[in-house]
Image (spheres, rainbow, N blue to C red):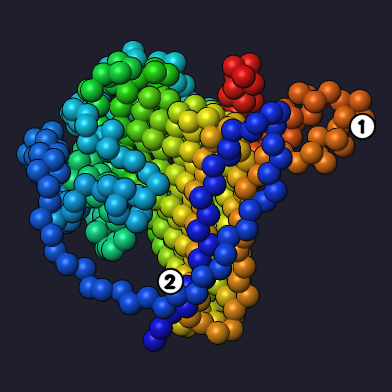
Amino acid sequence: MAAFAFTHQIRHILPTPASGRTKLRPKRGRSRVSIQAVAAPVASFSDQFVLELAESLEDSLPSTSSLPLQKLRDISSQSLLSTQWPSRKDEPFRFTDTSSLRQSEIKPITHPPEFPALLDKSGDGQFTNVVIADGFIIDSMCNFSNLPDGVYVGSLSGLSSEGIGKRVSEFLGDFQWGDLFWSVNGMGAPDFMVVYVPEGCRVENPIYLRYISVEGGDEGSRKLPLSNPRVFVLVEKGGEIGIIEEFVGKEVSKCYWANPVLEVVIGEGGNVKHSYVQNQSLSAAHIKWTSVRQESSSSYELVEVSTGGKLSRHNLHVQQVGPDTMTELTTFHLAVGDQTQDLHSRIVLDHPRGYSRQLHKCIVAHSLGQAVFDGNVKVNRYAQQTDAGQLTRSLLLEPRATVNVKPNLQIIADDVKCSHGAAISDLEDSQLFYFQARGIDLETARRALIFSFGAEVIDRLPYSIVQKQVKSHVRELLESTQKAS
């Protein structure tokens, strides 16, 4: 059966104005209807660089590991060795240049950092705190107290419950959409964190996962330490939990490659609230995968704020595998330097009465900055009475600032309510005039409007202390760009 794909593809670069600041109206892309045949995948041999990377990953790992971890490594190794390094000739990386990684001396990190290097990263008492440094779980800095009975938060290697181990093993390797970076993580993760919530259990305090990148090369160096942190979250029927991920660098100018993966499996009627804050070094690469599997009547809510990394990419895949399922994705990306902020998302709805909402907002505040959004929503044949909406809005503040957006809605079901839209602009003159008419000067008005553009997303973070920290950081970044200009 043919699938009709309604796709907007918009590439927009803010031109250099002849004089003053040019106002841009929101752009509308032309709808394109296409019928596409999908060819079966063809096996290919990896290039020499990927082979050498796979060997270095293998050499960095201990000779023995648990059966589930070895299973993950074997599957990932097979996939990696038949995958080419992505280039801009590949459609998923058309606007994202990964050649800087290929040209570097990638060295997988083989041991956790020294304890004193982490002393200034203390956790908050209202959360269950987990510290993962350079891909290694630092047990001495984790706080696993006050967890309800039956809840497990800890490393796979430290898991003593055979029942939980079997449940985790059921889902390991059961993902068909991963790319080379997914496989690199699966092959190179030294261990992985497991968060398990039993049936009917509500975990009051969220799990705060603090990822810290310590080892790094000097700015301009070809040395690129690689870490592969991995977390698996399994919420059984009727369970509820909050997950906070914060990614930071120990040094603001160090060069490193953080390559994390988060897998979330939500059982029938389960609920997961996920907050993701990315504030890596502006010289670092941050390539993250998030995979979510939702069973019937479950809900998943993501709020993401990404400001760090010279190259930052989030691959987000959500699969609804049951009816009456709810998905909400809210993201804000900010590029204040020579950065690429990239979100590639895919929501697959396979069952009746699915609900999804996606709001993506980005600000590019540097002439060499770039934002990329590729959002795919696929409504399959049996997903009748689906209600899906997607909106992306971009704010370009400097000449030659660039954004590439591709909202993509594919519908096979015939009884649905779906919409998507895209807008790219500078600040509107009418908005600035509103402030000036009330005695507020132009620069103050611009600062207020720019901050409020991102605050719409930040305000949806479910925890006030996280909201406060993120707002403060975003305000500092925006003020630094305004001073520089």
From the top left corner, tell me how far across and down residue 141 is, in percent: 38, 25
Q: Pick the residue in front: 252 or 202.
A: 252
Q: Is residue 21 left or right of residue 371?
A: right
Q: Which residue matches tag 2?
A: 321
Instruction: Locate the N terminus by quadrant.
Output: bottom left
From the top left corner, tell me how far across and down residue 381 is, in percent: 46, 82
Q: Is residue 307 left or right of residue 233?
A: right
Residue projecting furthest to the front: 18
Q: Pick the residue in front: 188 or 413.
A: 413
Tell us which disc is closer to us: 2 or 1: 1
From the top left corner, tell me how far across and down residue 32 is, in percent: 51, 70
Residue projecting furthest to the top: 116
Report, in whole angstroms, how far the alpha carbon at label 2 lies from the one at label 1: 53 Å
Q: Is residue 408 above or below residue 135?
A: below
Q: Is residue 423 left or right of residue 314?
A: right
Residue type highlighted by circle 1: Ala
Corner quadrant of residue 59: top left
